[in-house]
Image: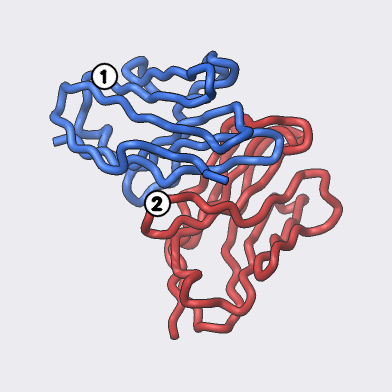
Amino acid sequence: DAGVTQSPTHLIKTRGQQVTLRCSPKSGHDTVSWYQQALGQGPQFIFQYYEEEERQRGNFPDRFSGHQFPNYSSELNVNALLLGDSALYLCASSWSGGYTFGSGTRLTVV
Amino acid sequence: AQKITQTQPGMFVQEKEAVTLDCTYDTSDPSYGLFWYKQPSSGEMIFLIYQGSYDQQNATEGRYSLNFQKARKSANLVISASQLGDSAMYFCAMRGGDMIYNQGGKLIFGQGTELSVKP
């Protein structure tokens, strides 16, 4: 049973560019959440998608947007990248049984 | 507002000994869930143990147990018989709403504790 798959694993972008991160949830999970984890910090909730709609959002600017597809997979888009956006981005899928996290995408903005 | 506090940035433990990682929480929700995750250097968050706010008994999962003291708002993780592979970051997290009734709201994480197991 495949867990949560995230792509790419590593990414380097230039300040001002746009980036798209992808997440395939665990089989049977219909809810996807995204978290940003800066170095040495705990993960911070960005937003959550369920039934292709954003259901909850954390304290992140509108530069952060997302999408969920009919197969429950999800994308995280970040526009106008800042140096401070450098972080590990974690995707978590959930159902009534709890949360499963992927290994994350490590984004470096230079 | 919900908050998780982990006051131990780093901990050392001798192999085969037990260790307790501290976690205190703050919430006004009557129903909530508390989680512990392990994060090795690979980055993946690995679920260890869960405690619901209405659970009468402390949760246990193999070598992991959760010392839940509701009145003190603490949910400490106890790892028995530490192994070298236990060396990692450990995060305490909370979600409003008990797992049984809630498909999955946002998780609030603490700052983490880095555990190092010495041979």
Local SS, label 1:
loop
Label 2 in the same subunit as label 1: no
Position of the C terminus of chain A by quadrant? top left
Coordinates of residue B83 in the picture (x, y in percent): 52, 77
State the residue at coordinates (57%, 46%).
A1
Res. B6 visible in picture? no
**In the current view of this chain or complex, which residue is farthest to the front?**
A1
Residue B17 position (above or below residue A51): below
Res. B95 visible in picture? yes
State the residue at coordinates (47%, 33%).
A24
State the residue at coordinates (64%, 75%).
B80
Coordinates of residue A71 in the picture (x, y in percent): 53, 22
Q: Residues within 10 Å of mark 2 (few under 14, many from 20)?
A: many
Of the chain colours in the picture, the one used for chain B is red
Which label sits on residue B43? 2
State the residue at coordinates (60%, 41%).
A99
Q: CA distance from mark 2 to mark 1?
A: 24 Å
Q: Tell me whether the residue at label 2 lies in contact with that at label 1, contact meaning CB atoms closer than 8 angstroms.
A: no
Which label sits on residue A32? none
Which residue is under mark 1?
A: A79
Local SS, label 2:
loop
Amino acid carrying label 1: it is Asn
Of the chain colours in the picture, the one used for chain A is blue
